Image (tube, rainbow, N blue to C red):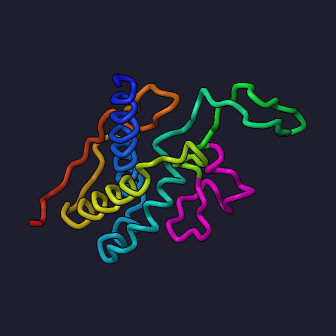
Amino acid sequence: MISTLVLLLIAGHETTVNLITNGWLTLQRHPEVLQRLRSEPRFAIRLVEELLRYEPSVHILPFRSAISDIEVGGTTIRMGHPIAVLLASGNRDPQCFPHADRFDPDRTDNVHLSFAGGIHYCLGAPLARLEAQLALTQLARRLRNPRLLADPPPYRPSPILRGPVHLAVAYDSVEPA
């Protein structure tokens, strides 16, 4: 029961916090996209999909096993052998994503790996998407003249989860809800 609760805390909280924080950081670095989100709130749907690809919360899924023999780069990985899935690397694969290192919320066919797949597909994916869409849209709409106080911010020292320890932002005012 304890391990399930820890899993829910990490999978259901930390990943979404990092998605929102990574998203806000990316928007601060791309003010034209932030302005577009202010004027087109429905743009948040496409924006979050690109954020999931470009700055995913989870970079690596360790402790997996190959479910069948597979050949990768001329090497055979045998069924049952341990593997680590590099989600962030796959999300930047230039064979799958043209201009993979460019942040492009208008990207089409954005079939990213950020929620994994198969039996490991994230059950909370719809909720995480919605939370990020709502949070980023409200931040964009309500904060006047937001600006980063430190870039890059300090990051957590985790090879699995990627997100800032904190994101210091100044702003001039907050619009009413």
**What count of labels does the image hold?**
0
* Residue shown at the point (68%, 62%) measured from the top left: 98
* Residue 142 placement: quadrant: bottom left
The kind of secondary structure the magenta stretch mainly shows is loop
Q: Looking at the image, is 163 positioned above or below residue 90?
A: above
82 left or right, relative to 31? right
Q: Residue furthest top?
A: 2
Q: Is residue 134 magenta?
A: no
* Residue shown at the point (64%, 50%) measured from the top left: 92
Q: Residue furthest bottom?
A: 39
Of the 4 image quadrants, the one containing the N terminus is top left
* Residue shown at the point (25%, 56%) measured from the top left: 146
Residues rendered magenta in the picture = 89-112
x%, y% of residue 121?
Answer: 53, 47
Q: Looking at the image, is 156 positioned above or below residue 169?
A: above
* Residue shown at the point (53%, 49%) measured from the top left: 114
